[in-house]
Amino acid sequence: MTCPRDPVAAVTHPDPSSYYALLAARQPFYRDENLGLWVAAGAGPVAEVLASPVCHVRPVHEPVPNAIAGTPAAEIFRHLVRMRDDPKRTALKAAIVKALAMVEPRDAMEASATLAAQLAADLSEEKPDLAGFAFSLPVQVVARLLGFLDEALTSVATSLTLFVAGLSPLAGTQTVEASIEAASDLMAEMRAHLASDGRHSAFCRTLIAEAERAGCHDADEIAANAIGLMMQAQEATAGLIGNVLVRLCRDPSLRLAVSRDAASLASIIQEVLWRDLPIQNTRRYVARETVIAGQALKPGEGILVILAAAQQDADASGRGMLAFGEGRHACPARNLASAIAEAGVARLLDRDGLADMALPVYRRSVNARIPF
């Protein structure tokens, strides 16, 4: 099997693990002129970049992607705390994390199991739309936890999927246009939901209360970040569901183990999170002159942060899992994503013929490893 041509191509390579291991060992931090980026692959440089206050999640000169600037999609994007590094967003970010931490695991598991069963029941027997299942389930679970009524869940998930698709740097004109339209619908629906006290769930009430306690009284900002929770859950969880299915398809003994002991699925999910991360890399942009791994970096330079390589780095022993990032932009919903994936995969395994599923081709992406 040939090696990936570069770290971005590795995301959709059939098996990039050896490539990542070599990169972390031999080129822990280097400049890739073809990509026009610095690349952090070793555990040490990756941790250094993610912890650096001058390595921002967006370029200073482009806080919102140019393709959506001045549109309803930009109105959501510009409010997202995970896409901002300004100090005044720190308190709101902490409020969101606190609200998520108060979600009862039992509620998350019940919502995941119920919705997975409903979505699986709608799958075609002859040609099941596994991608549609995997992309819709996490959005519907988060929407239900936010208190959306069941009849609204499909619409919310469809709009969210269209919106997120247009944010990809690979998106074409029509995809971006559909994203902008979907953003307008999403924001209107979320504003109406937040304004309707009678439909608020305990989680939604907590989210609003914690945001206001943090000094955020902007309804649009709270609405955008509620949408952001669904965004953050979608790709990572869809990739996790898909990569677990691939793992089970490649190793029939694991499928047998799960059929004998359903509890073993949880440990398989954790193994996949270590070995086949759904989000393989992320990016950071230098806001002012700095030094990373002994290299001088200039303002405006970009860094490709290869989480998948760093997690394989032999020097990473003792470090935490990187599948959900690390530092101030780490995803706070690791347990929720794992619960959704477990419920989704368990329900799919109940279907006849899934064990014979053809191994899929990975979806085009610069960072997400999603095998549908």
Image (cartoon, helix red, strand yellow):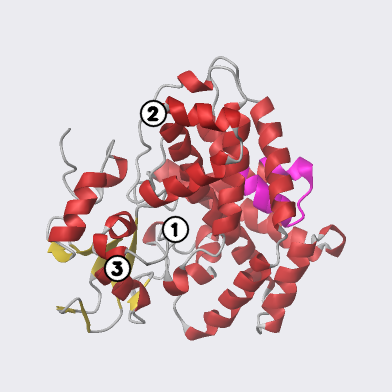
The number of callouts visible is: 3
x 69%, y 58%: residue:
190
- Of helix, strand and loop, which one carries label 2? helix
User: Label 3 to label 1, Cα distance in Å?
Assistant: 29 Å
Residue under numbered circle 2:
250
- Of tags 3 and 1, which is closer to the observer? 3
Q: Quadrant of residue 33?
A: bottom left
> Which residue is more in the foreground, 21 or 201?
21
Q: Label 1 belongs to which residue?
A: 68
Kindly identify the amino acid type of the residue bearing the numbered disc 3: Val
- Asked whether residue 187 is drawn in magenta, I would say no
Q: Which residues are magenta?
A: 137-154
How far is mark 1 from mark 2, CA to CA? 40 Å
The residue at 65%/83% (across/down) is: 214
What amino acid is labelled 1 in the image? Ile
- Tell me the quarter of the image containing the C terminus: top left
